Amino acid sequence: MSGTTEGRNSTNLSVSLQTFRSRKKRNLLEFLSTRSAAEYARDLATVGRSLRGIARFYLPLTKARDAEIVQLQKARNDANRPVAIGLTAEEIVEDAGLGDDGYPASEDGPIRKSSEQQMAS
């Protein structure tokens, strides 16, 4: 199953749930909550046809499909490794001034005088 198909399936689930009647939702919740996920496939035939279409979205992944997804995630993580910058620690700037208010900072305090200091001068 490809990523596109999975996205389409989740969209189909959303559409299907929107058109579901509240009685059917209660029946679905009862089906899902009265058994373990491992029993869903076995018991799927016991629910009505209209519920089967929705209940199949809750079937757990097979071990093979789960392994495929893990491999895909690992490949994506490997592809998204950070690029080596090649700068020394002294050359890397930690604060690029994004939080600056436009006035240079000094160890003695702000260069700009407060309104109280201006009045006193």
Image (cartoon, grey):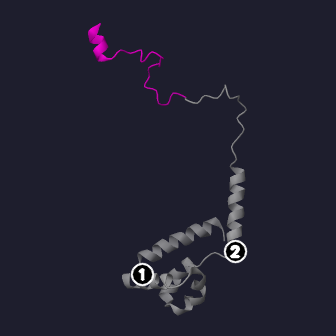
Inspect the image, locate mark 2, and give the three-letter code of the amino acid beneath it. Answer: Lys
**The image quarter in which residue 93 lies:** top right
Task: Name the one closer to the observer, 39 or 86.
Answer: 39
Q: Main secondary structure of the magenta part?
A: loop
The residue under label 1 is 25
**Image coords of residue 111 (percent x, y):** 42, 14
Q: Identify the residue at horizontal 60%, vertical 69% (top origin).
A: 6
Q: Is residue 113 above or below residue 24?
A: above
Q: How many marks?
A: 2
Q: Is residue 108 magenta?
A: yes
The residue under label 2 is 63
Pointer 2: residues within 10 angstroms few (<14), some, or many (20+)? few
In this rendering, the label closer to the viewer, 2 or 1: 2
Q: Identify the residue at horizontal 63%, vertical 75% (top origin).
A: 61
SS at mark 2? helix
Q: Is residue 6 above or below residue 73?
A: below
Horizontal side of residue 63 vs 31, given as left or right: right
Q: Give the residue at the far left of this rendering.
A: 119
Horizontal side of residue 117 vs 105, given as left or right: left
**Image coords of residue 5 (percent x, y):** 61, 70
In the image, the segment drawn in magenta is 96-121
Inspect the image, locate mark 1, and give the three-letter code of the amino acid beneath it. Answer: Lys
- Residue 51's mark? none
**Image coords of residue 27 (percent x, y):** 43, 86
